[in-house]
Image (tube, rainbow, N blue to C red):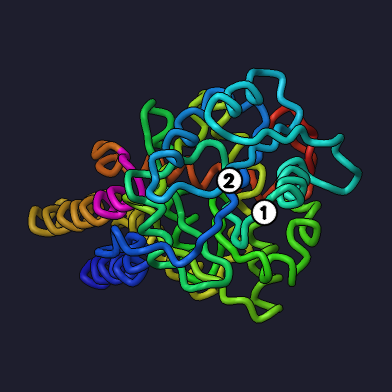
Amino acid sequence: MLFLFLIKLALLGLGFLLAPKLRPCGRGAAGAPLPIRRLSVIIPARNEAHNLPRLLASLAAQAPAPAEIIVVDDGSTDATARVAREGGATVLTAAPLPAGWKGKTWALHQGVQLATGDHFLFLDADTWFEAGGLARAWAEYGGGAFSVGPWHAVDRWHEDLSLFFNLNMIFGTVPQGLFGQMLLVDRASYERVGGHAAVQGRVLENFALAEHFRNAGVPVRSVAGRGVISFRMYPGGIGELVEGWTKGFAAGAGRTPPWVMALVVGWMVGLLFGPPGGLPADAGWKAAWAGAYLLGTLQLMWFARQSGNFRRLTSLFYPLPLLFFLGLFTRSALRSGQRTTWKGRDIRAD
Protein backbone atom coordinates (compact mmCIF):
# COMPACT_ATOMS: atom_id res chain seq x y z
CA MET A 1 0.00 0.00 0.00
CA LEU A 2 2.84 2.39 0.81
CA PHE A 3 4.41 1.79 -2.59
CA LEU A 4 1.14 2.56 -4.41
CA PHE A 5 0.63 5.68 -2.34
CA LEU A 6 4.11 6.96 -3.15
CA ILE A 7 3.47 6.35 -6.83
CA LYS A 8 0.37 8.55 -6.68
CA LEU A 9 2.27 11.35 -4.93
CA ALA A 10 5.12 11.11 -7.45
CA LEU A 11 2.72 11.31 -10.39
CA LEU A 12 0.90 14.28 -8.89
CA GLY A 13 4.30 15.90 -8.41
CA LEU A 14 4.78 15.87 -12.19
CA GLY A 15 2.08 18.52 -12.35
CA PHE A 16 4.32 21.00 -10.53
CA LEU A 17 6.86 20.63 -13.34
CA LEU A 18 4.14 21.84 -15.73
CA ALA A 19 3.10 24.79 -13.54
CA PRO A 20 5.66 27.30 -14.99
CA LYS A 21 3.86 27.06 -18.34
CA LEU A 22 0.91 28.87 -16.74
CA ARG A 23 2.94 31.99 -15.92
CA PRO A 24 0.88 35.00 -17.05
CA CYS A 25 2.12 37.13 -19.93
CA GLY A 26 3.77 40.46 -19.15
CA ARG A 27 3.67 40.18 -15.36
CA GLY A 28 4.67 43.58 -14.04
CA ALA A 29 5.04 44.96 -17.57
CA ALA A 30 1.73 46.84 -17.88
CA GLY A 31 2.18 50.33 -19.31
CA ALA A 32 5.46 49.57 -21.06
CA PRO A 33 5.83 51.50 -24.34
CA LEU A 34 4.89 49.65 -27.50
CA PRO A 35 7.96 48.88 -29.61
CA ILE A 36 5.95 48.83 -32.85
CA ARG A 37 4.49 51.85 -34.56
CA ARG A 38 2.07 50.30 -37.02
CA LEU A 39 0.05 47.20 -36.22
CA SER A 40 -2.50 45.56 -38.53
CA VAL A 41 -5.10 43.39 -36.80
CA ILE A 42 -6.64 40.72 -39.05
CA ILE A 43 -9.74 38.81 -37.94
CA PRO A 44 -11.31 35.96 -39.91
CA ALA A 45 -15.08 35.97 -39.35
CA ARG A 46 -17.72 33.49 -40.44
CA ASN A 47 -21.08 34.26 -38.79
CA GLU A 48 -19.42 36.10 -35.90
CA ALA A 49 -21.87 38.99 -35.44
CA HIS A 50 -22.39 37.91 -31.82
CA ASN A 51 -18.67 37.90 -30.97
CA LEU A 52 -17.26 40.88 -32.89
CA PRO A 53 -18.68 43.73 -30.75
CA ARG A 54 -16.76 42.60 -27.66
CA LEU A 55 -13.50 42.05 -29.54
CA LEU A 56 -13.66 45.32 -31.49
CA ALA A 57 -14.58 47.32 -28.38
CA SER A 58 -11.65 45.81 -26.52
CA LEU A 59 -9.24 46.73 -29.33
CA ALA A 60 -10.55 50.31 -29.44
CA ALA A 61 -9.94 50.60 -25.69
CA GLN A 62 -6.25 49.67 -25.91
CA ALA A 63 -3.67 52.43 -25.60
CA PRO A 64 -2.47 52.98 -28.20
CA ALA A 65 -5.05 51.30 -30.41
CA PRO A 66 -3.93 49.29 -33.48
CA ALA A 67 -3.35 51.27 -36.66
CA GLU A 68 -5.97 49.27 -38.56
CA ILE A 69 -8.42 46.45 -37.99
CA ILE A 70 -9.42 44.24 -40.92
CA VAL A 71 -12.32 41.81 -40.63
CA VAL A 72 -12.46 39.26 -43.42
CA ASP A 73 -16.09 38.24 -43.88
CA ASP A 74 -15.82 34.59 -44.81
CA GLY A 75 -19.19 33.83 -46.38
CA SER A 76 -21.28 34.90 -43.40
CA THR A 77 -25.05 34.65 -43.50
CA ASP A 78 -25.60 36.88 -40.47
CA ALA A 79 -24.80 40.56 -39.81
CA THR A 80 -21.04 40.03 -39.49
CA ALA A 81 -20.10 42.68 -42.08
CA ARG A 82 -22.44 45.35 -40.68
CA VAL A 83 -21.38 44.73 -37.08
CA ALA A 84 -17.71 44.89 -38.07
CA ARG A 85 -18.16 48.24 -39.83
CA GLU A 86 -20.10 49.65 -36.90
CA GLY A 87 -17.21 48.58 -34.67
CA GLY A 88 -14.73 50.60 -36.70
CA ALA A 89 -13.18 47.79 -38.74
CA THR A 90 -12.46 47.65 -42.44
CA VAL A 91 -14.46 44.79 -43.94
CA LEU A 92 -13.08 42.62 -46.70
CA THR A 93 -15.47 40.17 -48.34
CA ALA A 94 -13.64 36.91 -48.90
CA ALA A 95 -13.42 35.52 -52.40
CA PRO A 96 -14.81 32.00 -52.99
CA LEU A 97 -12.79 29.30 -51.24
CA PRO A 98 -10.25 27.79 -53.65
CA ALA A 99 -9.54 24.07 -53.74
CA GLY A 100 -6.94 23.01 -51.19
CA TRP A 101 -7.53 25.88 -48.77
CA LYS A 102 -9.30 25.91 -45.40
CA GLY A 103 -11.66 28.79 -44.67
CA LYS A 104 -9.55 30.37 -41.93
CA THR A 105 -6.23 30.24 -43.78
CA TRP A 106 -7.85 31.64 -46.93
CA ALA A 107 -9.45 34.50 -45.00
CA LEU A 108 -6.20 35.42 -43.25
CA HIS A 109 -4.23 35.23 -46.49
CA GLN A 110 -6.61 37.73 -48.09
CA GLY A 111 -6.52 40.02 -45.06
CA VAL A 112 -2.75 40.26 -45.26
CA GLN A 113 -2.98 41.46 -48.86
CA LEU A 114 -4.95 44.48 -47.66
CA ALA A 115 -2.90 45.17 -44.51
CA THR A 116 -0.40 48.03 -44.44
CA GLY A 117 1.28 47.43 -41.07
CA ASP A 118 4.81 46.31 -40.39
CA HIS A 119 3.45 43.76 -37.90
CA PHE A 120 0.39 41.54 -38.08
CA LEU A 121 -1.84 40.49 -35.19
CA PHE A 122 -4.12 37.59 -36.17
CA LEU A 123 -7.07 37.12 -33.81
CA ASP A 124 -10.01 34.75 -33.66
CA ALA A 125 -13.35 36.53 -33.39
CA ASP A 126 -14.25 34.89 -30.06
CA THR A 127 -11.28 36.50 -28.29
CA TRP A 128 -10.98 39.92 -26.63
CA PHE A 129 -8.26 41.91 -24.91
CA GLU A 130 -8.46 42.78 -21.24
CA ALA A 131 -7.78 46.37 -20.18
CA GLY A 132 -4.13 47.11 -20.95
CA GLY A 133 -3.70 43.61 -22.33
CA LEU A 134 -2.21 44.63 -25.65
CA ALA A 135 0.43 46.74 -23.93
CA ARG A 136 1.39 43.79 -21.72
CA ALA A 137 1.66 41.56 -24.79
CA TRP A 138 3.85 44.11 -26.58
CA ALA A 139 6.07 44.45 -23.52
CA GLU A 140 6.82 40.73 -23.63
CA TYR A 141 7.10 40.47 -27.41
CA GLY A 142 10.72 40.07 -28.44
CA GLY A 143 10.33 39.78 -32.20
CA GLY A 144 9.56 36.89 -34.52
CA ALA A 145 6.37 34.90 -33.98
CA PHE A 146 4.69 35.36 -30.61
CA SER A 147 1.46 33.92 -29.26
CA VAL A 148 -0.58 34.35 -26.08
CA GLY A 149 -2.94 31.56 -25.00
CA PRO A 150 -6.29 33.17 -24.11
CA TRP A 151 -7.74 32.85 -20.61
CA HIS A 152 -10.91 30.78 -20.82
CA ALA A 153 -14.06 32.65 -19.79
CA VAL A 154 -16.65 30.08 -18.67
CA ASP A 155 -20.35 30.79 -18.25
CA ARG A 156 -22.58 27.75 -18.80
CA TRP A 157 -21.96 24.48 -16.97
CA HIS A 158 -21.10 22.45 -20.07
CA GLU A 159 -18.18 24.80 -20.75
CA ASP A 160 -16.43 23.48 -17.62
CA LEU A 161 -15.89 20.25 -19.54
CA SER A 162 -13.19 22.09 -21.48
CA LEU A 163 -10.94 22.26 -18.40
CA PHE A 164 -8.50 19.49 -19.33
CA PHE A 165 -8.59 20.41 -23.02
CA ASN A 166 -7.63 23.97 -22.13
CA LEU A 167 -4.84 22.90 -19.78
CA ASN A 168 -3.45 20.45 -22.32
CA MET A 169 -3.53 23.15 -24.99
CA ILE A 170 -1.40 25.41 -22.78
CA PHE A 171 0.94 22.66 -21.57
CA GLY A 172 1.52 21.46 -25.12
CA THR A 173 2.11 24.90 -26.62
CA VAL A 174 4.02 27.07 -24.10
CA PRO A 175 6.76 28.18 -24.53
CA GLN A 176 7.81 27.17 -28.06
CA GLY A 177 4.55 26.69 -29.93
CA LEU A 178 1.82 28.96 -31.27
CA PHE A 179 -1.83 29.19 -30.25
CA GLY A 180 -4.44 29.25 -32.98
CA GLN A 181 -6.42 32.09 -31.40
CA MET A 182 -3.70 34.78 -31.42
CA LEU A 183 -0.49 35.33 -33.36
CA LEU A 184 1.74 38.41 -33.46
CA VAL A 185 4.45 38.43 -36.11
CA ASP A 186 6.47 40.95 -38.07
CA ARG A 187 5.78 41.24 -41.78
CA ALA A 188 9.28 40.21 -42.85
CA SER A 189 9.19 36.94 -40.88
CA TYR A 190 5.67 36.17 -42.07
CA GLU A 191 6.61 36.68 -45.71
CA ARG A 192 9.83 34.69 -45.28
CA VAL A 193 7.89 31.48 -44.57
CA GLY A 194 5.21 32.10 -47.19
CA GLY A 195 2.51 33.15 -44.74
CA HIS A 196 -0.76 31.26 -44.57
CA ALA A 197 -0.35 30.10 -48.14
CA ALA A 198 2.29 27.70 -46.82
CA VAL A 199 -0.27 26.06 -44.51
CA GLN A 200 -3.37 26.61 -46.64
CA GLY A 201 -4.88 23.14 -46.18
CA ARG A 202 -4.31 22.71 -42.45
CA VAL A 203 -7.07 22.81 -39.82
CA LEU A 204 -4.47 23.44 -37.08
CA GLU A 205 -2.54 26.02 -39.05
CA ASN A 206 -0.82 27.27 -35.89
CA PHE A 207 1.21 24.07 -35.46
CA ALA A 208 2.28 24.04 -39.09
CA LEU A 209 3.19 27.74 -39.04
CA ALA A 210 5.29 27.30 -35.91
CA GLU A 211 7.26 24.58 -37.67
CA HIS A 212 7.80 26.77 -40.74
CA PHE A 213 8.98 29.67 -38.57
CA ARG A 214 11.43 27.49 -36.66
CA ASN A 215 12.80 25.98 -39.87
CA ALA A 216 13.38 29.50 -41.21
CA GLY A 217 15.23 30.58 -38.06
CA VAL A 218 12.41 32.84 -36.84
CA PRO A 219 12.06 32.87 -33.03
CA VAL A 220 8.82 31.24 -31.85
CA ARG A 221 7.51 31.84 -28.33
CA SER A 222 4.24 31.67 -26.42
CA VAL A 223 2.91 32.37 -22.92
CA ALA A 224 -0.36 32.00 -21.04
CA GLY A 225 -2.76 34.93 -21.26
CA ARG A 226 -4.45 35.60 -17.93
CA GLY A 227 -5.07 39.36 -17.67
CA VAL A 228 -4.06 39.89 -21.30
CA ILE A 229 -6.46 38.18 -23.67
CA SER A 230 -9.53 36.02 -23.08
CA PHE A 231 -11.92 33.89 -25.09
CA ARG A 232 -15.12 31.94 -24.70
CA MET A 233 -15.20 28.62 -26.51
CA TYR A 234 -18.24 26.65 -27.63
CA PRO A 235 -21.01 28.45 -25.73
CA GLY A 236 -23.64 26.97 -28.06
CA GLY A 237 -23.97 23.69 -26.21
CA ILE A 238 -22.38 20.30 -25.64
CA GLY A 239 -22.69 19.33 -29.31
CA GLU A 240 -20.68 22.34 -30.43
CA LEU A 241 -18.07 21.62 -27.75
CA VAL A 242 -17.71 18.00 -28.80
CA GLU A 243 -17.34 18.80 -32.50
CA GLY A 244 -15.03 21.74 -31.82
CA TRP A 245 -12.53 19.77 -29.77
CA THR A 246 -12.86 16.67 -31.97
CA LYS A 247 -11.86 18.40 -35.19
CA GLY A 248 -8.18 18.41 -34.39
CA PHE A 249 -7.26 17.93 -30.75
CA ALA A 250 -5.61 14.53 -31.16
CA ALA A 251 -3.58 15.83 -34.10
CA GLY A 252 -2.45 18.75 -31.96
CA ALA A 253 -1.42 16.41 -29.16
CA GLY A 254 0.70 14.52 -31.67
CA ARG A 255 2.79 17.67 -32.15
CA THR A 256 3.42 18.15 -28.43
CA PRO A 257 7.07 17.57 -27.42
CA PRO A 258 7.37 13.97 -26.17
CA TRP A 259 8.77 14.93 -22.77
CA VAL A 260 5.86 17.32 -22.20
CA MET A 261 3.38 14.65 -23.27
CA ALA A 262 5.00 12.21 -20.82
CA LEU A 263 4.60 14.72 -17.97
CA VAL A 264 0.97 15.46 -18.86
CA VAL A 265 0.02 11.81 -19.19
CA GLY A 266 1.79 10.92 -15.95
CA TRP A 267 0.07 13.75 -14.10
CA MET A 268 -3.38 12.79 -15.36
CA VAL A 269 -2.76 9.15 -14.45
CA GLY A 270 -1.81 10.38 -10.99
CA LEU A 271 -5.11 12.21 -10.67
CA LEU A 272 -7.06 9.03 -11.41
CA PHE A 273 -4.71 6.61 -9.65
CA GLY A 274 -6.09 4.96 -6.53
CA PRO A 275 -5.76 1.75 -4.52
CA PRO A 276 -7.09 -1.41 -6.21
CA GLY A 277 -10.55 -2.34 -5.03
CA GLY A 278 -11.34 1.09 -3.58
CA LEU A 279 -10.26 2.70 -0.32
CA PRO A 280 -8.63 0.35 2.21
CA ALA A 281 -10.41 -0.59 5.42
CA ASP A 282 -7.59 0.79 7.56
CA ALA A 283 -8.63 4.24 8.76
CA GLY A 284 -5.12 5.65 8.54
CA TRP A 285 -4.64 4.67 4.91
CA LYS A 286 -8.15 5.77 4.08
CA ALA A 287 -7.33 9.25 5.39
CA ALA A 288 -4.01 9.24 3.51
CA TRP A 289 -5.66 8.45 0.17
CA ALA A 290 -8.35 11.03 0.82
CA GLY A 291 -5.60 13.56 1.53
CA ALA A 292 -3.90 12.69 -1.76
CA TYR A 293 -7.18 13.27 -3.60
CA LEU A 294 -7.48 16.65 -1.86
CA LEU A 295 -3.92 17.48 -2.92
CA GLY A 296 -4.80 16.74 -6.54
CA THR A 297 -7.95 18.83 -6.21
CA LEU A 298 -6.10 21.85 -4.80
CA GLN A 299 -3.40 21.56 -7.45
CA LEU A 300 -6.03 21.42 -10.18
CA MET A 301 -7.94 24.37 -8.70
CA TRP A 302 -4.80 26.50 -8.98
CA PHE A 303 -4.16 25.33 -12.55
CA ALA A 304 -7.79 26.04 -13.46
CA ARG A 305 -7.66 29.56 -12.01
CA GLN A 306 -4.57 30.39 -14.10
CA SER A 307 -6.21 29.20 -17.32
CA GLY A 308 -9.86 30.31 -16.86
CA ASN A 309 -12.71 30.90 -14.46
CA PHE A 310 -13.62 27.23 -14.17
CA ARG A 311 -15.81 26.46 -11.18
CA ARG A 312 -14.21 25.00 -8.05
CA LEU A 313 -16.72 22.15 -8.12
CA THR A 314 -15.27 21.13 -11.48
CA SER A 315 -11.89 20.62 -9.82
CA LEU A 316 -13.42 18.90 -6.78
CA PHE A 317 -15.15 16.34 -8.98
CA TYR A 318 -12.32 16.26 -11.52
CA PRO A 319 -12.67 12.56 -12.48
CA LEU A 320 -15.79 13.48 -14.46
CA PRO A 321 -14.24 16.16 -16.75
CA LEU A 322 -11.04 14.12 -16.96
CA LEU A 323 -12.89 11.02 -18.15
CA PHE A 324 -14.82 13.21 -20.61
CA PHE A 325 -11.51 14.53 -21.90
CA LEU A 326 -10.07 11.03 -22.32
CA GLY A 327 -13.18 9.84 -24.12
CA LEU A 328 -13.28 12.78 -26.50
CA PHE A 329 -9.54 12.58 -27.08
CA THR A 330 -10.00 8.96 -28.15
CA ARG A 331 -12.86 9.99 -30.44
CA SER A 332 -10.68 12.68 -32.01
CA ALA A 333 -7.82 10.23 -32.55
CA LEU A 334 -10.13 7.69 -34.21
CA ARG A 335 -11.56 10.36 -36.52
CA SER A 336 -8.20 11.86 -37.48
CA GLY A 337 -8.08 12.24 -41.25
CA GLN A 338 -11.84 11.72 -41.61
CA ARG A 339 -14.34 14.26 -42.81
CA THR A 340 -16.28 16.33 -40.30
CA THR A 341 -18.40 19.49 -40.31
CA TRP A 342 -17.39 22.81 -38.80
CA LYS A 343 -19.15 26.15 -39.26
CA GLY A 344 -21.21 24.77 -42.10
CA ARG A 345 -18.24 23.45 -44.06
CA ASP A 346 -17.19 19.90 -44.72
CA ILE A 347 -13.54 19.54 -43.64
CA ARG A 348 -11.01 16.78 -43.16
CA ALA A 349 -9.59 16.74 -39.63
CA ASP A 350 -5.79 16.95 -39.38
Residue labelled with disc 1 = 116
Q: CA distance from mark 1 to mark 2?
A: 8 Å
Q: Residue at x 68, y 50 (%)?
A: 115
Q: Quadrant of the N terminus?
A: bottom left
Image marks 1 and 2: residues in contact by CB distance under 8 Å:
yes
* Residues rendered magenta in the picture: 300-310
State which tag comes first along the sequence, 1 or 2. 2
Query: In this view, which residue lies farthest toward the left?
Result: 284
Q: Is residue 33 visible?
A: yes
Question: What residue type is disc 2 on?
Answer: Glu
Q: Residue at x 64, y 61 (%)?
A: 207
**Kind of element beneath mark 1:** loop
Image position, residue 239 (x, y; %) = 57, 27
Residue 68's disc is 2
> Is the residue marked by circle 2 packed among few (<14), some (14-19), or many (20+) residues within 10 Å?
some
Horizontal arrangement in the rendering, residue 269 relative to residue 208 (left or right)? left
Q: Is residue 308 above or below residue 242?
A: below
